[in-house]
Image (cartoon, rainbow, N blue to C red):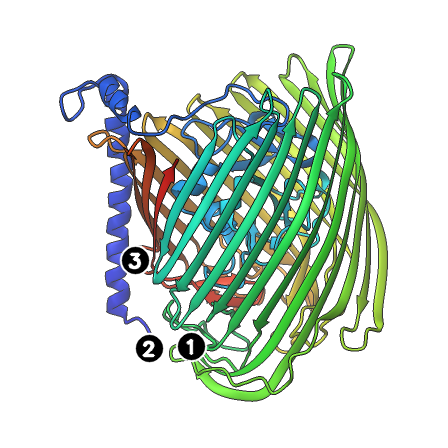
């Protein structure tokens, strides 16, 4: 097995990985037992009581303020352990406790972002087994899979507005919360530009807190990338009504890819006003990135077997370059006319560009040999969006109502330039050849599509028997308009305009004060999309389609741990690129059924756990000639597991260790079920130490992702990329 891992190496790594997994699980159990003893007042290692040890620790760590309830406009308080929040936004339905939501949601906090040293949204959301990223670190960007379906980065909402973020990735140093909704979110947030149905992600920007903040952080990432971040917040006014929060970050240096270098910079300003009746905010950000040797994707084409995974330090197309630029401004306001009526409105504009090499691999073999053609693919996106409506709170015959009515409008223009060179170079995955120069001049980006997404919604949540029964029902009338143009000539190629009603029905029953039984049915209209560049029918528009979800589950809040179990079914048309003809189009329907198990919280004092498992039953039906009916769709595993732990060591105040195991089962490359990508497991570890130096709060953090350098394929559609290598992250944070 030249250029690949030998069988002996595989066996050795598997044995070591299993040993570490057993050790990690054992340490979690031991820590739980020890934390239990401390919780009961057992002596500490130095002979002091647990209370004394806790008191000693509190003198060296920053204080954490816990809010019992949130005022209008405030974020829900963190749950026990601080890694996730007690609730979050669910779009037009407003903010609610997770126990009152008829959906599966996870709301990650700023503490979780900091302690895991997440760089993008993708680094954070993989803490849930139902969510995976489909592109590797160092690649073009984040594409997510939620409940077996793709969720495009364009379908990430910023403060509840779609179209305001990059088509590549969002740096999380600008964020305070990342809220993940599992299942279609079109009724709650409106339809995203990418038409994703597996779930929705909403990110929340930072706001100035009551306590003044000046935080500086030094950063390091292997191979040798250094950076610096600043986070400054202040409030002004007699009652602190006005707030300003600034965040900025810059990183530069060598990456984990051979001969790679990346320069990243971002900055954001957030202003807000919080009065007794009026709440207002304004956000603006700018993000730029220049990368030499970014981690490209590649297709298996007509290969008869899955090639062995190459070294993670390899760029499959040496010589690739990527430039990203994104900026946006947005504002939101809410005004309480009285105790019964609130009017709200938001508007934003985003402009983003990307310039990249877009190579094409032909003739891939099972031995990893192929011919590489170099190309250009540059794109711009200009988006304007508006969201406005009214919320009513009233009672009728003892039944409480929260009625929401409103409109959303999104207008997005996309343009691109695409060119593929005519010169091919012989290459292979394990010793890739440098790309040949593109023998076509780089041209200007020209308009390729104009999309209009408009909707009107009416949704009512009714509360019975002192909030023991919650019923949610409503609908969203959606209109999709899309015009497609030839970016070379400017001529209009096609136009479509379609409407549909998307209903929502949800119920929450609370047989016990700490138990919620819920169910929902949602149906959404999604943009049919356009055949992407590089396909034989690039630019062809497809009609919108409907997707449906059925879900039921049980949540239980045990005080310091929240557990949940849910079952679901989602179906949508199957969009594929034929590997033989290279035509993009629909072929049948994908239906995914699943079972989700999750638990998170602080099991005992100082021990925080996040555990989840998802089991999938994916099937394809209605394919041409029935040739693939009953097969598994490509890219959907049978199961996925997560286990994460974070533990404060009692014998060293301020010192904490953490670890995470992420496992994803084997999956088919496409719905023909002939090529099967192996399962994979990733191990992450970390340590942090909080102390006071010169009367300043200081936190040192070190994390290692992919501790054993596991090699595995990550898949998006019919493209794959090799996973990122072992990566070391170090930071030193100082609060002034």
Q: Is residue 494 above or below residue 143?
A: below
Q: How far separated are the C-alphas under marks 3 and 2? A: 19 Å
The quadrant of the picture occupied by the C terminus is top left
| Residue that label 1 marks | 429
Which element carries disc 2, helix, strand or loop? loop
| Among the 4 quarters of the image, the one containing residue 542 | bottom right
Q: Which mark is residue 3?
A: 2
Q: Nearer the viewer, residue 564 or 230?
A: 230
- Provide residue 521's location: percent of width, then percent of height: 69, 37
Image height check: is 642 above or below 442?
above
Quadrant assignment for the N terminus:
bottom left
Instruction: Residue 480: tell me if it is visible.
Output: yes
- Mark 1 and mark 2 residues within 8 Å of each other at the beta carbon: yes
Q: Give residue 708's mark.
A: 3
Could you tell which of marks 1 and 3 lies nearer the N-terminus? 1
Tell me how far mark 1 sits from mark 2, CA to CA.
Answer: 9 Å
Q: Is residue 615 visible?
A: no
73 or 622: which is nearer to us?
73
Res. 31 image quadrant: top left
Q: Residue at x 33, y 37 (%)?
A: 698
């Amino acid at each position: 097995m030249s250029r690949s891992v030998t069988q002996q190496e595989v066996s050795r790594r598997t044995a070591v990985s299993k040993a570490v997994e057993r050790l990690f699980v054992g340490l979690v159990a031991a820590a739980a037992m020890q934390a239990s003893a401390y919780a009961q007042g057992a002596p500490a290692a130095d002979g002091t009581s647990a209370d004394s040890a806790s008191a000693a620790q509190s003198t060296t760590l920053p204080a954490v303020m816990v809010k019992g309830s949130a005022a209008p406009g405030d974020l829900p308080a963190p749950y026990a352990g601080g890694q996730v929040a007690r609730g979050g936004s669910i779009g037009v339905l407003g903010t609610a406790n997770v126990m009152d939501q008829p959906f599966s949601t996870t709301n990650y906090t700023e503490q979780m972002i900091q302690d895991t040293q997440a760089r993008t949204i993708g680094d954070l959301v993989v803490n849930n087994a139902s969510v995976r990223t489909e592109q590797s670190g160092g690649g073009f960007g984040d594409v997510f899979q939620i409940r077996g379906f793709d969720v495009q980065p364009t379908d990430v909402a910023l403060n509840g507005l779609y179209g305001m973020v990059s088509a590549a990735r969002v740096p999380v140093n600008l964020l305070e919360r990342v809220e993940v909704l599992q299942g279609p979110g079109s009724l709650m947030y409106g339809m995203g530009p990418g038409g994703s149905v597996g779930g929705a992600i909403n990110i929340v920007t930072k706001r100035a807190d009551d306590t003044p903040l000046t935080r500086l952080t030094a950063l390091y990432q292997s191979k040798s990338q250094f950076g610096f971040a600043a986070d400054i917040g202040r409030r002004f006014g007699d009652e602190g009504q006005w707030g300003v929060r600034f965040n900025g970050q810059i990183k530069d240096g060598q990456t984990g890819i051979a001969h790679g270098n990346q320069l990243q910079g971002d900055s954001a300003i957030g202003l807000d006003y919080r009065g007794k009746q009026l709440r207002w905010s304004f956000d603006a950000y700018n993000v730029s990135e220049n990368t030499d040797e970014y981690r490209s994707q590649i297709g298996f084409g007509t290969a008869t077997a899955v090639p062995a995974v190459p070294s993670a330090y390899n760029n499959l197309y040496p010589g690739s370059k990527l430039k990203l630029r994104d900026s946006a401004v947005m504002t939101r306001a809410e005004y309480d006319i009285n105790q019964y009526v609130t009017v709200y409105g938001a508007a934003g504009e985003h402009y983003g560009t990307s310039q990249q090499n877009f190579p094409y691999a032909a003739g891939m073999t099972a031995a990893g040999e192929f011919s590489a053609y170099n190309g250009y693919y540059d794109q711009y996106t200009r988006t304007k969006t508006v969201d406005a409506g009214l919320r009513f709170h009233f009672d009728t015959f003892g039944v409480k109502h929260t009625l929401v009515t409103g409109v959303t409008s999104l207008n997005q223009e996309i343009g691109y330039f695409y060119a593929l060179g005519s010169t091919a170079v012989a290459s292979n995955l394990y010793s890739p050849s440098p790309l040949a120069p593109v023998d076509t001049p780089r041209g200007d980006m020209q308009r390729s599509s104009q999309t209009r997404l408009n909707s009107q919604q009416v949704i009512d949540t009714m509360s019975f028997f002192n909030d023991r029964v919650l019923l949610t029902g409503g609908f969203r009338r959606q209109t999709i308009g899309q015009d497609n143009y030839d970016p070379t000539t400017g001529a209009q190629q096609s136009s479509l305009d379609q409407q549909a009603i998307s209903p929502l029905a949800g119920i929450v029953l609370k047989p016990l004060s700490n138990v919620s039984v819920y169910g929902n049915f949602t149906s959404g209209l999604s943009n049919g999309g356009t055949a992407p560049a590089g396909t034989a029918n690039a630019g062809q528009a497809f009609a919108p389609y409907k997707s449906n979800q059925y879900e039921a589950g049980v949540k239980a809040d045990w005080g310091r741990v929240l557990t949940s179990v849910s079952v679901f079914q989602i179906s949508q048309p199957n969009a594929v690129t034929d590997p033989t003809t290279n035509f993009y189009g629909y072929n049948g329907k994908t239906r995914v059924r699943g079972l989700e198990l999750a638990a998170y919280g602080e099991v005992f004092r100082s021990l925080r756990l996040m555990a989840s498992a998802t089991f999938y039953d994916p099937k394809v039906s209605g394919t041409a000639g029935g040739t693939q009916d009953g097969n598994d769709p490509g890219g959907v595993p049978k199961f996925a597991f997560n286990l994460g732990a974070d533990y404060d060591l009692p014998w060293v105040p301020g010192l904490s260790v953490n670890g995470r195991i992420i496992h994803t089962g084997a999956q088919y490359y496409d719905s023909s079920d002939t090529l099967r990508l192996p399962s994979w497991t990733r191990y992450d570890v970390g340590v942090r130490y909080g102390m006071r130096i010169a009367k300043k709060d200081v936190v040192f953090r070190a994390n290692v992702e992919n501790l054993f350098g596991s090699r595995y394929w990550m898949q998006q559609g019919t493209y794959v990329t090799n996973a990122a290598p072992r990566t070391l992250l170090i930071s030193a944070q100082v609060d002034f």
